[in-house]
Amino acid sequence: MEQAVMNSMMESIFSAIEKMIPTYMANEVDKRIANGNVAICIIDPAGRVYGKLWGGNQIRNRQSYQVAWVKASQVWITGLKTGEYEKLVFSGQVDEEQYGIERPDLIGWEGGQPVTLYDGTILSIGFSGFRGIVDLEIVVKAFESIDFGKSIPAGK
């Protein structure tokens, strides 16, 4: 995918997420986690990193982005959703040394996932700041809301 197209898509994703944040903040459980200080980290196949922070607390944003980065980079390395990778490691189905991410460095929280674009490009995405299930959902909804050849989240 051309870099200009990728950059435009990232801005569209960031904009779509920004519009959804108030809806998720209406849930007290999600609001309590980071009070709207949420972050996304996206790694493309060439290793370029894209990110966005929302909310006014720089310290909390830093923490949210750090978690989003760990989620995205683990997906980038393993090709698996973060929660799925943890289950495979702890059930003995995957040797944690296979990917070089060993306990306690692996992250098992949901919110990291691969997204496959219309042209086969796979993005490794981490989102942090809400409950893990919501971290996954907001990314899926954002990609479904934009028109870049009908981007399809992996596993859908």
Image: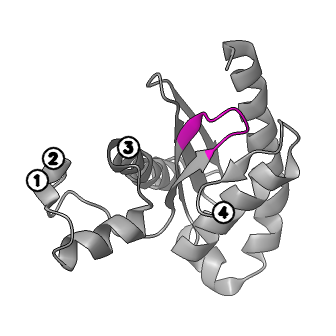
Q: Amino acid at mark 3?
A: Ser
Which residue is labeled 1 in the image?
97
Q: Is residue 139 left or right of residue 110?
A: right
Residue 13 included in the magenta stretch of the image: no
Q: Which residues are magenta?
A: 116-123
Element class at badge 1:
helix
Q: Nearer the viewer, mark 4 or mark 2?
A: 2
Q: Residue furthest bottom?
A: 28
Q: Earlier in the sequence, mark 3 or mark 4?
A: 4
Q: Nearer the viewer, mark 3 or mark 4?
A: 3
Gap between marks 3 and 2, in whole Å?
12 Å
Which residue is labeled 4 in the image?
36
Tag 4 near tag 1, CB within 8 Å: no
Q: Amino acid at mark 4?
A: Gly
In the image, 14 versus 73, the foreground residue is: 73
Gap between marks 4 and 1, in whole Å?
35 Å
Q: Earlier in the sequence, mark 3 or mark 2?
A: 3
Q: Name the image quarter holding the N terminus.
A: top right
Q: Earlier in the sequence, mark 4 or mark 2?
A: 4
User: Secondary structure of the magenta portion, mostly?
Assistant: loop
Element class at badge 2:
loop
Q: Amino acid at mark 2?
A: Gly
Which residue is labeled 3 in the image?
73
Element class at badge 3:
helix
Q: Residues within 10 Å of mark 4 (few under 14, many from 20)?
A: many
Q: Is residue 15 visible?
A: yes
Q: Nearer the viewer, mark 4 or mark 1?
A: 1
Q: Is residue 132 left or right of residue 17?
A: left
Residue 105 spot, x, y in % from top left:
20, 57
Q: Residues within 10 Å of mark 1 (few under 14, many from 20)?
A: few
Gap between marks 3 and 4, in whole Å?
23 Å
